[in-house]
Every structure is written in structure tokens, then in C-alpha cells.
């Protein structure tokens, strides 16, 4: 069994590569829910949905989120009434959030709801929320540009503020009292290989590690855990991972990534653009594998998956 610690787009693309090279039913993704947000009364799980839509082949490759061929009539109507539309929800996507919200209100757990959504899309991999408890990624803004608040939720930072403002700290509200979601610890403990996807180390993987018990479970499997760097030549392909690392005192390089992951993973896969830093990664106590990590096509994603899974041995 392969277990992947997953955030958003980068994790979704790697998972799409992994299911090309191993039986999909043998793949489990433990997915970040620190990004979850309630908008217009609906519970939205952006990372779970990005992974779901990507594995279903229904994602929008241009945006990296949402569905291909989406329409926006509901948002247009909401805007006509003066409602907030900075967080766009497509018409088809709304069905997912309605299903999730209605079932949560009826007392169904998020793991069971996620399984129902996966089944609706015909997915074979297992998707597990990191926790069923409320954990919220909160960003403290360095310049007070949050519209009167020094601290904002992740979606406000990422979408409303377009992650264009500096951050002085990040916290995962509620993590200290949360429990790992159903099946999460078993998925990690029973995995042949644990993969830390090329997701933002701070706000995509960080929330998972903040849930008590998850980091310890991964450390126990360190010799079978492989991480993929989301940083290439000092920059993130998408999103603010590089800026967040610098703002929070980390080196925005594969060496900085190694320092974050060296206690939980024994190997770091880096891009060919950073081949000259392989020795520095190994100095941090991790084996280093150099390959093409830019998943520009399904074929490249599959080849990366083969390399990552092979690195565990």
C-alpha cells in the first residue's frame, strides 16, 4: 500500500501519476483539511476536492482548482444581490459542497462523506481527511493588510488577498485538541511507502503534522518515507511556498525543505535544476534523488511516481 500526505495541486498531480504505476486501490491519500472554510453556509474542503477532481480527470488544468467546463451562474446571481464573490464556487462544484454540508448537519463524519464523494466520481484510491475535528490554518499578516485584522484564515490570505501580503506567523487553530481521522494512522503504519507530496511544507503538510499522533506515526516509518520538494531552483511552481518559507525563517531551497522534513523522511527527491545541491541535502541527513519533478504531462507524472516509489528502497 502507498500512503501519500497530500495538500492541493502538486499532490493531486503526483497522485494522478502514482495511480498510473500501481493499482489505484492500493493508494491512500491523507489530505489536509486546515484549508477548509465555511462560505455561504457551505462547508468547503478545497484540498480534498482538488485531489478528487484531479484523480477523476475532471479538474481544470488552467486554474489548478475547480472543474473543467464549469459555469458560474450561481456566483453571478449572488453578486447581483451584493453578496461576497471573492471565493468563486462553480455551479457543478456547488453540488459537492451541498452534499458535504447536508451530511455534516445530519451527523455524518467527514471521512464517510469523503468516501461518498469519491464513490460518486468512481475513484478507487482511498481519500482520508487528516482529521474530522475543526483545524483552521490561520495567517498572521506582517503589515496589517488583512482589512482591519492582523490574523486571517488561509482562504482569505490565499484567495481574497491573493497571497500577496507578507506573513509573520502561521498557526493551526484547534490542532492541539484534534484526533487523526478514521483510518489515518493505520494507513501510515501499514504503508509499504509513505510519500510526502510536493505540497507547501508550511500550510499544506504542516497542518497534518500538527494533528497529534500523525507526525509520530510518520517518524516511525521514516526509513520508508520519501518527500518530494515543491521548491525548484529557489521558487515554487505555483503558490506562495517559497515566500512563506523565507518569511518564516526557512531557506527557500531544497536544502530548506530537507531541514523541514529530515525528521520524518529518509529521502528527498529534487529537480534536476537543483542537482548541484544534492550534496547539501545529504549533509542534512537525507538521501537525495535527482530527477525531473515538473509534472508537465501525465507521462512525466508517472515517471516521477516510479522514481519516488523506487527511492524508498
Image: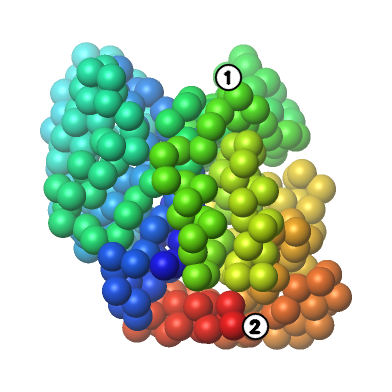
Quadrant position of the N terminus in the picture: bottom left
Picture quarter containing residue 129?
top left
* Residue 207 rendering spot, x and y as whole percentages: 58, 40
- Mark 2, Cα crowd under 10 Å, few <14 / some 14-19 / many 20+, is many
Local secondary structure at mark 2: strand
Q: Residue at x 22, y 25 (%)?
A: 103
Picture quarter containing residue 125?
bottom left
- What sort of colour scheme is used for the picture? rainbow
* Residue 46 rendering spot, x and y as whole percentages: 38, 41
Q: Is residue 276 left or right of residue 25?
A: right
Residue 25, relative to residue 95: is it above or below?
Answer: below
Quadrant position of the C terminus in the picture: bottom right
Local secondary structure at mark 1: loop
- Out of 23 and 293, give the one closest to the viewer: 23
Residue 197, relative to residue 312: is it above or below?
Answer: above
- Out of 101 and 87, give the one closest to the viewer: 101
- Residue annotated with mark 1: 147
Sequence order check: which comes first, mark 2 or mark 1?
1
- Residue annotated with mark 2: 289
Residue 238, relative to residue 150: is it above or below?
Answer: below
Q: From this viewpoint, is residue 225 visible?
A: yes
* Residue 294 rendering spot, x and y as whole percentages: 49, 75
Q: Residue at x 75, y 73 (%)?
A: 286
Q: From this viewpoint, is residue 238 visible?
A: no
- Out of 308 and 140, give the one closest to the viewer: 308
Amino acid at each position: 500500500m502507498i500512503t501519500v500526505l497530500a495538500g492541493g495541486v502538486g499532490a493531486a498531480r503526483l497522485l494522478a501519476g502514482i495511480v498510473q504505476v500501481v493499482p489505484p486501490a492500493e493508494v491512500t491519500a491523507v489530505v489536509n483539511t486546515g484549508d477548509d472554510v465555511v462560505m455561504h453556509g457551505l462547508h468547503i474542503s478545497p484540498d480534498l476536492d482538488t485531489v478528487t477532481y484531479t484523480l477523476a480527470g475532471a479538474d481544470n488544468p488552467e486554474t489548478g482548482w475547480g472543474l473543467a467546463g464549469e459555469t458560474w451562474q450561481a456566483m453571478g446571481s449572488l453578486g447581483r444581490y451584493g453578496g461576497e464573490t471573492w471565493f468563486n464556487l462553480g455551479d457543478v462544484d456547488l453540488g459537492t459542497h451541498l452534499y458535504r454540508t447536508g451530511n455534516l448537519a445530519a451527523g455524518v463524519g467527514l471521512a464517510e462523506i469523503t468516501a461518498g464523494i469519491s464513490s460518486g466520481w468512481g475513484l478507487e484510491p482511498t481519500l482520508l481527511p487528516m482529521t474530522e475535528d475543526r483545524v483552521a490554518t490561520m495567517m498572521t499578516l506582517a503589515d496589517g493588510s488583512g482589512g482591519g485584522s492582523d490574523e486571517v484564515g488561509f482562504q482569505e490570505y490565499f484567495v481574497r488577498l491573493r497571497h500577496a501580503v507578507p506573513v509573520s506567523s502561521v498557526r493551526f487553530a484547534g490542532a492541539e485538541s484534534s484526533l487523526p481521522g478514521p483510518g489515518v494512522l493505520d494507513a501510515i503504519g501499514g504503508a509499504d511507502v509513505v510519500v510526502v507530496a510536493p505540497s507547501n511544507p508550511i500550510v499544506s503538510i504542516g497542518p497534518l503534522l500538527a494533528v497529534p499522533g500523525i507526525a509520530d506515526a510518520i517518524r516511525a516509518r521514516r526509513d520508508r518515507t520519501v518527500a518530494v520538494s515543491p521548491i525548484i531552483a529557489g521558487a515554487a511552481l505555483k503558490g506562495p511556498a517559497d515566500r512563506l518559507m523565507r518569511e518564516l525563517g526557512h531557506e527557500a531551497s531544497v536544502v530548506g525543505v530537507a531541514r523541514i522534513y529530515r525528521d520524518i523522511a529518509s529521502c528527498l527527491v529534487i529537480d534536476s535544476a537543483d542537482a548541484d545541491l544534492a550534496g547539501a541535502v545529504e549533509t542534512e541527513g537525507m538521501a537525495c534523488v535527482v530527477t525531473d519533478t515538473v509534472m508537465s504531462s501525465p507521462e512525466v507524472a508517472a515517471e516521477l511516481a516510479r522514481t519516488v516509489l523506487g527511492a524508498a528502497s
